[in-house]
Amino acid sequence: MINIVAIVGRPNVGKSTLFNRLTESRSAIVDDMPGVTRDRHYGAAEWCGKKFSVMDTGGYVEGSDDVFEGEIRKQVKLAIEEAQVILYLVDVKTGITDYDKEIAQLLRKSRKKVILVINKVDTHKDEAVASEFYALGLGDYFTIASASGSGTGDLLDEVVKHLKPEDEEEEELPKLTIIGQPNVGKSSLLNFLTGSNRSIVTPLAGTTRDTINIRYNSFGFDFLLVDTAGLRKKNKVKEDLEFYSVMRSIKAIEQSDVCILMIDATQGVTIQDVNIFHLIEKNNKGAVILVNKWDLIDKDKVNTRMFTEEIKNRFAPFTDLPILFTSVINKQRIHKALETAIEVYNNRKKKVPTSQLNKVLLPIIAATPPPAYKSKLINIKYITQVPGMYPRFVFSAVTRNM
């Protein structure tokens, strides 16, 4: 099994900074504004030869009227259920707050290994003040400064003591990235597939800010699902925070095998949908087009044939894309979408023998030969496929005088 270490705490105590430190990455968005991290966010870490996953969570706030805060509380509770070790992060600069006490009470009930971590300890005076956190009733603590990395080595030494033995290394899994404009139903699709509120879903566009990875292992499928922040037009990306979210989405496309591009049926095929598709195509990724919210369409005015033709016209010359019409809310054709995505993934991995390539392509080339180059004719001798993450072919040729 994969060991999971969850970082929990109230907003703005430095959870995402610690996450980035432990995973040696910048995967989590860090900002001074509280509540930046809304979903559970995973990253790989290794210490003393032991590998584990680190989970960043949204700041826990009890009793807030904010729609996101209620969802963040649910995410933290789910994170506690998943984790083997919980790092409870507090801020030495602000001391113990009522929120800290509420979270500590929740953690004491979890029966999980909880390590109290006091962050932003930069001076000897901070070290002296840290002792007041014994009042939380969680035992001994570790003092760190996550921004500089001070104290994280000792913390990790303690963490790995409580990890369960690792299973044999698992084979690399296909990565399917759910991509699309904001509020087309990406997180709703992810939550339906995983059978849990894995991502925060609200009617507000732009809810998902980080990319989220989760393993899907049900109904004969086994792959990684990646949910991403919605991609907007550049002139609509005003906050620094949203700019970084878009960068995460682009990186998720680059690291995926197949992209599930979701289109809002009620909006039709927009320029931004076309731009996102070209981003997928530019990165040589497989693609499945998912037209969501099909249940809201008046079928007397628009049918699947008309919509398919519009997609093919806008995405030309790529006219052989698999296109499915779905309703995530009504659970229509969701598993068919997964089957299609895996089929695309398997097609990307196919190895076509040289003999078959020659048999099919050489007669076509002979009928329509390439143009002459510097007054010399080009004669294609054979075609072969070269190794790679996507199909690539080399045409071996010789030239002769005209």
Image (tube, grey):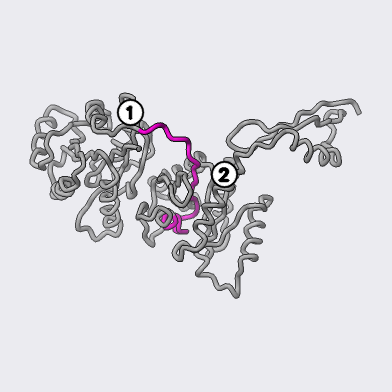
Q: Secondary structure at mark 1?
A: strand
**Which residue type does callout 2 highlight?**
Tyr
Q: Is residue 99 visible?
A: no
- Crowd tier of the residue under label 1, counting other residues whose Cα lies within 10 Å: few below 14, some 14–19, many 20 or above: some
Residue 11 is situated, as x and y percent measured from the top left of the image, at: 24, 47
Q: Residue furthest bottom?
A: 300
Q: Is residue 184 magenta?
A: yes
Residue 127 badge: none
Residue 164 falls left or right of residue 189? left
Quarter location, residue 202:
bottom left
Q: Is residue 181 magenta?
A: yes
Residue 346 is situated, as x and y percent measured from the top left of the image, at: 58, 43
Residue at image position (40%, 45%) is: 214
Q: Which residue is mark 1?
A: 50
Residue 345 badge: 2
Q: Give, as a single range, the part of the protein colored magenta.
A: 167-189
**Which residue type does callout 1 highlight?**
Lys
Q: Residue furthest right?
A: 402
Kindly indicate whether the residue at mark 2 contacts the one at mark 1 (C-beta within 8 angstroms).
Answer: no
Q: CA distance from mark 1 to mark 2?
A: 31 Å
Q: Point out the image quarter for the N terminus.
A: top left
Residue 121 falls left or right of residue 15? left
Quarter location, residue 401:
top right
- Crowd tier of the residue under label 2, counting other residues whose Cα lies within 10 Å: few below 14, some 14–19, many 20 or above: many
Residue 395 is situated, as x and y percent measured from the top left of the image, at: 74, 32
Residue 2 falls left or right of residue 129? right
Number of numbered discs on residues: 2
Residue 391 is situated, as x and y percent measured from the top left of the image, at: 64, 38
Comparing 276 with 319, the one in front is 319
Residue 376 falls left or right of residue 304? right
